């Protein structure tokens, strides 16, 4: 069964409401996919920079450890001076400790970014997933129902199957799920262009 038929059957509406919901959901999914791709490209660039920093710090650590090894050998040969001791304790050891800490933090950051690359595409939830998970049903229902895109159709008699605009008295008729709702509208901008379109021949 198609999404349209399933939604229509579940909510007991005409074809136009499910079509509008599906249309909006597809638009949101497309937007999320584009944003996700941009984020992934940005994360890949970030990982490259992190790897570069890790390599640089690992090279520095390697040199520092080699110096430490030389001082140990000097100590074994009893050529170890007071200056060597002060250099090892005050400069070399803190530097080794600092470099190890930097490398550890960089690797943690890299792992976190690599995990983001593996995550699944987020799904669309009208009303907000957080509100639904937190059982804030009042906010969820309000956000879910506060608006809906009603796309026009070239084949429709009035260019839209749910709205009918009477240009003689500025009255708009909206076909809701229960009844027709009629109310007066006033357009402050592009009124002439809009009415000209409404007055065009059907399917023009």
Image (cartoon, rainbow, N blue to C red):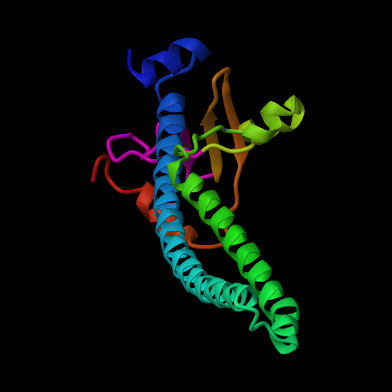
Q: Residue at x 47, y 35 (%)?
A: 163
Residue 64 location, quadrant: bottom right
Left or right relative to 147: residue 24? left
Q: Position of residue 71 (x, y in %)?
A: 61, 77
Q: Position of residue 169 (x, y in %)?
A: 54, 44
Q: Nearer the viewer, residue 43 or 182?
A: 43
Observer-nearest of 95 and 155: 95
Left-right relation of 75 to 10: right
Q: Is residue 148 magenta?
A: no
Which residue is painted at 62% across and 72% down in the image? 76
Asked if the magenta segment contains residue 152, the reply would be yes
Q: Residue 77: which quarter of the image?
A: bottom right
From the viewer's perspective, tell me whether residue 33 is left or right of residue 175. left
Q: How many marks?
A: 0
Q: Main secondary structure of the magenta part?
A: loop
Residue 127 pos. (x, y %): 63, 33
Position of the N terminus by quadrant = top left
Instruction: Give the vertical position of 99 relative to 171 (above or below).
Output: below
Q: In the image, is residue 3 above or below residue 129?
A: above
- Taking the spot 33% from the left edge, 34% from the top edge, the residue there is 157
> From what the image shows, is residue 186 above or below residue 89?
above
Q: Residue at x 38, y 21 (%)?
A: 4
The magenta region covers 149-169
């Amino acid at each position: 069964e198609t999404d349209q038929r399933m939604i229509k059957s579940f909510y007991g509406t005409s074809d136009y409401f499910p079509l509008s919901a599906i249309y909006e959901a597809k638009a949101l999914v497309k937007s999320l996919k584009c944003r996700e791709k941009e984020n992934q490209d940005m994360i890949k660039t970030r990982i490259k920079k992190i790897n570069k920093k890790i390599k640089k710090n690992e090279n520095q650590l390697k040199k520092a450890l080699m110096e430490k090894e030389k001082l140990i050998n000097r100590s074994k040969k009893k050529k170890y001076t007071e200056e060597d001791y002060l250099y090892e304790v005050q400069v070399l050891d803190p530097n080794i400790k600092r470099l190890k800490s930097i490398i550890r933090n960089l690797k943690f950051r890299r792992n976190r970014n690599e995990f983001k690359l593996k995550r699944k595409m987020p799904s669309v939830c009208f009303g907000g997933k957080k509100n639904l998970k937190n059982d804030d049903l009042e906010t969820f229902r309000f956000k879910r129902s506060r608006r809906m895109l009603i796309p026009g159709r070239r084949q429709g008699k009035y260019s839209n199957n749910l709205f009918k605009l009477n240009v003689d008295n500025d009255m708009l008729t909206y076909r809701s799920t229960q009844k027709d709702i009629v109310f007066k509208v006033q357009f402050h901008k592009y009124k002439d262009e809009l009415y000209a379109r409404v007055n065009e021949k059907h399917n023009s």
